[in-house]
Amino acid sequence: MSKVYKRSSHLLYTIGICVFSMIMISSIVILNALDDCGLMYTSGTSLKKLLMDQAAYDYSIWALSDKDGNYNEEFMNEKGCNIGIIETDNGNLGDLDLNDSSTYIYRNFDQELPAQYYMTNVYTTDDSEFYLSEKLYDFLFVNGNEVYNYDIEEYQPKDIKGIGYDMVGQKAYVWDGENFIELNDTSYNYKASDEGGTYNTTNIYDRIWASQVPEDSNQHSFTAAADDKKQTSQEDDSSKEKKETNVVIEDEKIANEENSNEENSNEEKDNLLQSEEIKDEEDQMLPAESIITTSGDAKILYIDGKAYPALGDDNSGYILELYGAESSGALSLSNVADLSDLHDQLGSEDLSVCTLDTVSSVMEYTMDSSYKQYTVITFPRADQSRDSFFVQAQRYLGIIPVLHVALPLLMVISGILVLVLSILLVIRAGNYDDHGRLSTDILADFPIEVTFVIFGCVESLAIAVIHYSAGYDYNTSQYGLVVIGIGLLIGIYAGILWAESIIINFKRKQLFRNTLCYKMLRAMARPLRRGIDSIKTVLASIKWGYRIAGMCLVIAFVEYMSIAVIDDKESLMLFWLLEKVVLAAIIIMVLKQYAKVKKAAVDMADGNMDVRVDTTKMLIDLEEHGQALNKIVSGLNTAVNERMKSERMKTELITNVSHDIKTPLTSVINYVDLLQKENFDNETARSYLEVLDRQAKRLKKLIEDLIEASKAASGSIKFNMETVNARMILNQSVGEFDDRLTAGNITVVTDVPDKDVYVRADNRYLFRVLDNLMSNIVKYSQEGTRAYVELNEDGGMVRYTFKNISRDKLGISADELMERFVRGDMSRNTEGNGLGLSIARSLTESMGGKMELTVDGDLFKVDVTFPEVVKESVA
């Protein structure tokens, strides 16, 4: 039952989110549509005027859409609208009589205009496109009736004959040879600059201004500024007396420089303007608007034969930056005319606007020749239809105030419900089921990027359906609204599913791990980690690894600095970078293979004969080296195995022979014992029996030692490991040899701690080790000397030490003495068989101890070490 409840609640949450989201989105769309139409924040009289003006505008659009016909007269009569159309200039009706029928180019009424009528202005061309609707507003998708005028401006290229700047109005103008044209703001910038004009731009305008100098430059000059007081006292507006004014014009040098492809030379021309006296004021004086005042030594620039002062000189600190579509440049103020005195005249004229194409040409904007403006007069009839635009306006007048309150409230409530349901869905998504498992869905198992792409495709499809249905007349039907609703529902539901998959992955703590990026990085991490490990191994294994890396970096840096000074370094730098990457990979590969060979050689030197060099994918020389090492290892292993086999055969032979000899020897010993019990009167025979008994027992001891040495070497002895009192067992071993030590005149000096010391060993075999070492002292010590026996604790270890002076000269090393059947008595006069030390070492090592033998001249020293067992652990 709980499972059914969870599923049903999930479905209800999803349906609720979809429904309330659609309500919220619809409310927002309608609110925006009302706001775009200016209806959202308008009420009362303003709202009524806005609606009625819109109704009048819609009738105007319908009428002008059929201006080549009867102005949709049937539509106007059907809707009950009176309309009159006047062709005007810039919407200015002037003194036109609106009740005169001749004022109109069309009207469908004869009576005089009522007290309340509506006037609209509409612009059209021959290419105008009309969008018509019988609805006053369509708040969901379209804006109703519209007229679109395309390409009403035409562009005409013109050459610049002069350029000037109005310092008062902060605007630039160009002269095309006939008229002034205003320069678009984006085509220039008057700014401070210490660099002056660019060479080409200055050269071009020097030629432009030079070409505008009139033939008789004396007749076209500007009046120099005089003292204001003196000028006021001398001028009389009522007198017509002639005056003489001298205008001194300074020499001007016009430099024309040409760039020649063949000679690459500059030519200069000097034009000298000579000063002349003006004789007749009426003949020589310019019109009032052309008399330009200036001060100082300014360059004269001519526009339409009239002289203008330059805005400044080449060192004024300002320039006019020109931005053309094809070319740009900086123009010094010596080539810019000062048009400040024409500010009022230029501002009052309706000038065309142009943009720069090059620094010496412009593109002028001109209106389409078919461009016309109409003033349309409309007012409703008494018998309007129910769907008249004016009736619709009255209907909206009652609805829109309600929407002002209802739409925001509906949007807020639906938004809150969507938020609450979304939170509930988030809490429910990925909850644990009755078995403690995290519930999931199909999308949550896909990588995040895959679900995003699926979500994006579905959303794009939904948006395309909505856009298609909303962009055409199809949306006016009920089927169009259904399609739009379905598209919106699909988009919302797809968003819910995608959000739910994200939430589930987040609750699983795998939001990042369930992405393609993470999986790609994880797939790349393993080879990258192997590469880093290889580099570390190479640097650690090869003595010169860091030095090689450092030298490579130094060489690469030197090459980089060398390339950096080359002009065409971009393409070369890319090739250098690729070459370094490849070279680094090759060096790392070679060093890695060399490290393998070196490591194998070092392991072999340390005695590891199981090492093998993997020669696959190696370079030829390193491969041969590795194969040679593998052959050496194989040969050594073969030799070792052969020796081990020989040793095993020797051990088995000794064991078998010892067992075979032991049986008849036992019989010999028994019969010798029986003969000794007989009463022989012959003393010689009795002495023979004593020798035979002694040698038989000696042979028996030898055979027993051989068997024990064989067992110790082969590891076939089973030890009964226990905690042994090391001090006590040493004292017992020394006590066993008191009689023999006294007989040999050997004094034993013991150094044993007062407290008990414990080790882990087999008590019987440990005693055998100590017994062999004491027997060695008895057999081989110099008579009349001292032997030393010690027991010490050293860093968690217990050490037995036996030292004595050898009776015979020790001409062999300690390692040789540890071998089997090797004795310090090379003459073999003593009773030893050379197995005691070998047996003692084998037994010691088998019990986990260590035995070391040292020979220093005639000093013979043996150390036997075992790990110490702590007394508390013994208790």
Image (cartoon, rainbow, N blue to C red):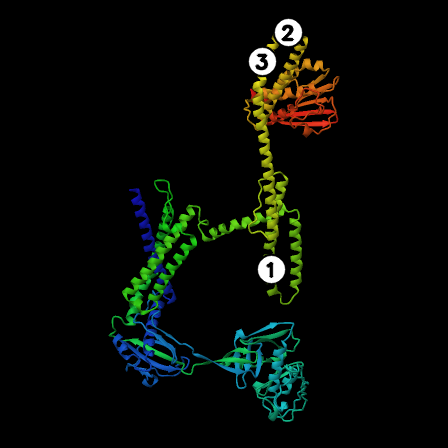
Give the CA distance from mark 1 to mark 2: 106 Å
For this view, does 480 lie left or right of residue 666? left
Dot 1 or dot 3: first in sequence order is 1
Instruction: Name the element at disc 1.
Output: helix
Pinpoint residue 14: horizontal percent, then vertical percent: 33, 52
Q: Are marks 1 and 3 in contact (CB under 8 Å)?
A: no
In the picture, the disc for residue 670 is: 3
Judge left or right: residue 420 versus residue 855. left
Q: Which quadrant of the rendered structure holds the C terminus?
A: top right
Q: Quadrant of residue 727?
A: top right
- Residue at image mark 2: 680
Tell me the distance, in whole angstroms, between the alpha carbons under discs 1 and 3.
92 Å
The answer to whether residue 872 is visible is no
Label 3's element? Answer: helix
Query: Residue 530 or 731: which is nearer the viewer?
Result: 731
Task: Tell me how far mark 3 sits from mark 2, CA to CA.
Answer: 17 Å
**In front: label 1 or label 2:** 2
Mark 3 or mark 2, which has the lower sequence index?
3
Q: Which mark is residue 537?
A: none
Q: Please, is residue 325 above or below residue 178 in the view?
A: above
The label number, if any, that marks residue 579 in the structure image: 1
